[in-house]
Image (tube, rainbow, N blue to C red):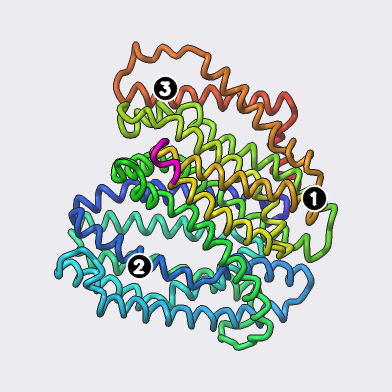
């Protein structure tokens, strides 16, 4: 793939894969609940969650390995890449074994841990054993995924995963048409998810990203990667705690925990969608910034930081502003107009995500340099502060306390970038970085005000949820048209340049 197409192609295929996954997931849930019943379908969720916790065993290797592989490739250290990659295969083999043992232990003695019937636990036990069997295959593909990402072949992984999603859709159709048992459905689903190992490994061998599939034990070289990854693991742990604890705190401290948690889940849908699409940037940027840091190309780093902070802001504005200006209509269409009172909190959450994600390019450079100690410390303190704020504000703001606490959390992290990283580590102009964010955002705000002032007499043609859906689509379309026009008019966006010009 030509260098100039790297960003565009990778973002396109990543977005396509994520949207396709979201569609299949959205459609599959009611169909599978209808086939197996809510209780039995819940068994699949419990098994998946149990296995999901095991992925903490990754220890941050997904980020660290990509960074080092990209830097070593840029420095011509192919032998080192091969040695660590093959040792990585050994590492993930050990992880897979621990994963499998953990799942089998839960399957054998874990019945008292779950509030389910004996018959349901027997079904859960079967699912856990299936997951344990496939552990070696699911973990086995991780090294090859890291190599492909480091070699800027993320579009290939997204294409393969898109095919995988199609197979999952086909499996759902087969299950419905043949009345497939829950056990066989889970077996085939796990097989499909584990099959990524085959195309990933084949591509790595074919293109010379690894010299052999034979596991190795070059632990001295591997230790360099692992020590960096442990810092990333600590950072991820605090980030996950800060975000995942919010509904738990609501359930414990709010006046009506169940209602607040349900409200949180309702307004979480749109921000989660924005984060899902925006998270693509991290995987795209890290291989490039790691190469730049390895080559000590200060000019390229500076150009990358300014250009992609602006472009990332523009793209996230495209995703988030329709929900910001159409929050009330979106909620009324999605869960009924009785929940429209949650609109201000949804808007604030989307604004917070926009502020958070505009630092993704800067974050990728920081990760490439490996200077994460201060980020880990600040994130740890920030995590505690946001959790305390959430608990203290529950009595006054109810579900809004979780969104306000998240805003505090993001603001503190962003302050660290502007007051420390941009100036001291990256030697960038903080004012210029801030302008790269503010200029397109202010344009988006002006367009939002105009879009809100335009009358939309759609109530003459629609009513109920169809009316709110139409209003949301109309406002989003008007805002998008205005935003594109103003970006082009102010020369902030050049699609041709974006596709053809590389950094």
Q: Is residue 79 above or below residue 363?
A: below
Front residue of 456 and 341:
341
Q: Report the Cα–Cα distance between label 3 and label 2.
A: 41 Å
Q: Which type of secondary structure does the marked residue at label 3 adopt?
A: helix
Residue 42 placement: quadrant:
bottom left
- Disc 2 from disc 1: Cα separation: 43 Å
Residue at 40%, 65% (x, y): give it: 52
Q: Is residue 351 magenta?
A: no
What residue sits 68% from the left and 40% below the top? 311
Is 332 placed left or right of 12 in the picture? Answer: left
Please state the horizontal and vertical placement of residue 262, each as a whole percent of the image: 32, 43
Horizontal placement of 359 versus 276: left or right? right
Front residue of 205 and 95:
95
Camera-side mark, 2 or 1: 1
Badge 2, how many Cα within 10 Å: few under 14, some, many 20+?
Answer: some
* Sequence-earlier tag: 3 or 2: 2
The residue segment tinted magenta is: 392-396
**Among the 4 quarters of the image, the one containing residue 436:** top right
Instruction: Indicate which label's residue lies in the foreground, 3 or 2.
Output: 2
Task: State whether residue 42 is above or below residue 453.
Answer: below
Identify the disc placed on residue 50: 2
- Mark 3 / mark 1, whichever is N-terminal: 1
* Disc on the earlier residue, 2 or 1: 2
Please state the horizontal and vertical placement of residue 22, each as a whole percent of the image.
41, 48
Q: In the image, residue 346 lies at what x, y percent?
A: 45, 35
**According to the image, label 1 marks what residue?**
423
Residue 266 drawn at (x, y percent): 36, 40
Q: Residue at x 70, y 49 (%)?
A: 417
Q: Nearer the viewer, mark 3 or mark 1?
A: 1
Q: Estimate how packed mark 3 is, as few (under 14), some (14 to 19) or many (20 or more) residues with alpha carbons within 10 Å.
A: many
Secondary structure under tag 2 reads helix
Query: Label 3 belongs to which residue?
Result: 471
């Amino acid at each position: 793939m030509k260098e100039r197409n790297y960003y565009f192609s990778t973002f396109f295929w990543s977005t396509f894969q994520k949207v396709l996954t979201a569609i299949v997931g959205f459609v599959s849930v009611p169909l599978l609940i209808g086939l197996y019943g809510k209780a039995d379908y819940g068994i699949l969720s419990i098994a998946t969650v149990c296995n999901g916790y095991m992925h903490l065993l990754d220890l941050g290797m997904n980020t660290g390995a990509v960074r080092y592989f990209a830097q070593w490739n840029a420095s011509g250290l192919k032998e080192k890449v091969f040695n660590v990659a093959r040792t990585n295969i050994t590492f993930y083999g050990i992880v897979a074994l621990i994963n499998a043992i953990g799942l089998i232990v839960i399957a054998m003695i874990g019945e008292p841990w779950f509030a389910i019937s004996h018959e349901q636990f027997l079904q859960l036990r079967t699912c856990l054993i299936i997951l344990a069997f496939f552990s070696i295959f699911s973990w086995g593909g991780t090294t090859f995924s890291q190599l492909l990402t480091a070699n800027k072949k993320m579009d290939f992984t997204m294409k393969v995963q898109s095919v995988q999603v199609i197979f999952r859709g086909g499996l759902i159709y087969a299950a419905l048409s043949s009345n497939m048992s829950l056990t066989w459905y889970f077996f085939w689903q796990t097989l499909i998810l584990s099959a990524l190992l085959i195309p990933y490994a084949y591509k790595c061998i074919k293109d010379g990203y690894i010299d052999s599939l034979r596991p190795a034990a070059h632990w001295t070289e591997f230790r360099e990667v692992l020590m960096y990854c442990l810092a990333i693991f600590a950072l991820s742990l605090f980030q996950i705690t800060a975000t995942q604890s919010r509904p738990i705190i609501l359930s414990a401290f709010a006046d009506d925990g169940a209602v607040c948690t349900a409200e949180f889940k309702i307004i979480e849908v749109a921000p989660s969608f924005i984060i899902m699409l925006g998270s693509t940037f991290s995987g795209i940027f890290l291989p490039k910034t790691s190469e730049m840091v390895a080559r000590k190309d200060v000019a390229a780093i500076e150009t990358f930081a300014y250009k992609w902070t602006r472009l990332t802001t523009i793209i996230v504005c495209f995703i988030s502003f329709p929900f910001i200006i159409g929050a009330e209509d979106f909620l009324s269409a999605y869960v009924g107009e009785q929940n429209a009172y949650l609109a201000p909190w949804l808007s604030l959450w989307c604004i917070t995500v926009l502020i958070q994600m505009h630092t993704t390019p800067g974050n990728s450079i920081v990760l490439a340099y490996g200077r994460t100690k201060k980020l880990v410390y600040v994130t740890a303190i920030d995590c505690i502060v946001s959790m305390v704020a959430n608990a203290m504000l529950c009595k006054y703001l109810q579900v809004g306390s979780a969104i306000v606490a998240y805003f505090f959390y993001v603001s503190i992290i962003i302050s660290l970038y502007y007051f420390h990283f941009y100036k001291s580590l990256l030697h960038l102009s903080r004012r210029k970085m801030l302008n790269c964010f503010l200029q397109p955002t202010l344009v988006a705000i002006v367009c939002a005000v105009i879009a809100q002032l335009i009358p939309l007499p759609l109530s003459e043609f629609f009513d109920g949820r169809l009316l709110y859906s139409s209003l949301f689509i109309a406002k989003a379309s008007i805002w998008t048209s205005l935003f594109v026009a103003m970006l082009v008019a102010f020369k902030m966006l050049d699609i041709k340049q974006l596709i053809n010009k590389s950094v």
